[in-house]
Each structure stands twice: as structure tokens, then as C-alpha cells.
Amino acid sequence: MSLSYLLTISLLPFLPLLVDSQWNWNPFQAWNSQSPAIPQQNLQQPNWQQPNWQQQNWQQQQNWQQPAQLAANTDISPAQTARQRWREIYGIPGQRNANQKLRTCCRTLKDADPECRRKYCDFNALSSNQVIGFMAECASKGPTVGQMWDCASSRQDHTPCCQRQQVLPACVVYCQTKRGVPTDYLKYIVCLSQFDKIRYCFKEYLETNPNVKGQE
């Protein structure tokens, strides 16, 4: 008999014990017992705040309503705008300034050219660098220049004012307006440089006096 056979025969009685104690061994159990425990992190779900859509919609409505309400409060009807514009141009009777009295006078000039009235019936438009354009454009249009000159000058003698403003003696003829405007413009071409001073005297008079039509 061989030696291996004899060893096998001798271990047969102990075979049940070996099966019960050794073959139930779990290799992963030993590995788990040796491995360090991994701490479990306390993971919390983020606290996402749900948007309050109702509140946001209300705020948006308020933001849109405020400009709308402001526009409604400041809205001016076309009729009110027209009246306001009329008062700016022609003023209120008894409260008109010099320019408004001039415009009110020109408005009554039915025979004067409408375009000349619109462009030049204003003291700001009758400056030294524009009066030559007024003469050139409107002199051929009937009584336009003479009538508008009367509205601006009030057909008064402004000599004392022109002297205070140091208007050239040769140009004082434009300050003596009781006889109307001189018609020989080329003779007085040098006076164009003096017209701002003359215009000042016309305007000064109208600030405290009615216009040539008696309108205050």
C-alpha cells in the first residue's frame, strides 16, 4: 500500500469536522474585518426654494402699472395741448409779453403774406442777420413788410431809446416809425448792423404798452 492511501484512510473519520469548520469560510469576511470603516457622510439634499410665481407676477404687474398710471395722470388731450400752445404763442389778454403782442398784431393782418407772418413775425426772427432776408423775401408781397413793420414798431418815435443804445445817427430814421418803414433799403444798408439795437427799442416799448392794434 502506498503512503498516500494510508493517509487518506486515516483522515476519513475527521472529514465531517473539516467540512463543517473549513468550507464555510468566507474570504470577503476576513477582508472586511481588516478594512477601515468608511465614514458615511451626512448628505443633505439642497434646500431649493420654490419661486413664488404669484408674488413675482404681482410685482411685475405693479411695475408695469406704475408707468401706465403715471402716463394716465400726465396725459393731456389734444385740445388741451392746442390751448396751451395757443397761449404760448399769443398769450393771455392783459398778460402778454412784447413778443406775444407782436404775434397777436400780425395775426390780424389779413392782407399780409401768411408765410412771411409765420417766419418773421417774431422779435427773435428780426435780428440783424435776418432782417435782410425778411426784406428780400417779403418786400414784393403786397403790404406785408409795411404792415409787419407797423406791428413791430407800434408806429412810435423810439429816438430817445435809440440814442441811449447809441444807434448811428444815419440810422435813427428807422427809429422814427410814425411814418412807417423807409422804402429805399439800399440807402440804409449800413443800418443792418444797427438793427439789433433798434429792435431792442421796439421790444422795450411793447413790454409796457399795447400794440398798434390796441391789444394788451
Image (cartoon, grey):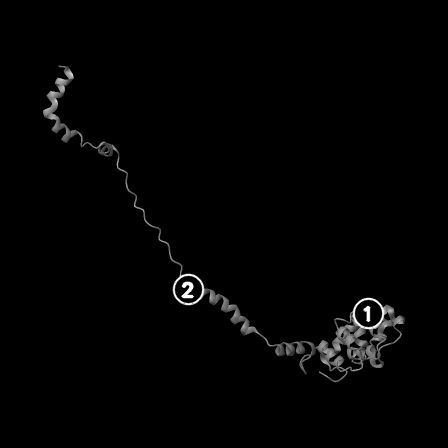
198 or 80, which is in the foreground? 80
Q: Callout 2: 10 Å neighbours few (<14), some, many (20+)? A: few
Question: Which residue does the image show at 82% across and 67% down from the upper left?
Answer: 193
Question: Which residue does the image show at 72% across and 80% down from the upper left?
Answer: 208
Can residue 79 be spotted in the picture? yes
What is the quadrant of residue 207 in the picture?
bottom right
Label disc, if present, on residue 55 of the rendered structure: 2
Q: Earlier in the sequence, mark 2 or mark 1?
A: 2
Split into 4 quadrants, where in the image is the N terminus?
top left
Label 2 vs label 1, nearer the camera: 2
Label disc, if present, on residue 133 of the rendered structure: 1
Identify the amino acid type marked 2.
Answer: Gln
Residue 129, how many percent across, how many down? Answer: 80, 67
The residue lying furthest to the left in this view is 13
Residue 63, how many percent across, how many down? Answer: 49, 66
Q: Secondary structure at mark 1?
A: helix
Cα distance between the residues tagged 2 and 1: 66 Å
In the image, taking residue 197 as reference, residue 74 lies left or right, namely: left
The residue lying furthest to the front in this view is 1
Label disc, if present, on residue 163 of the rendered structure: none
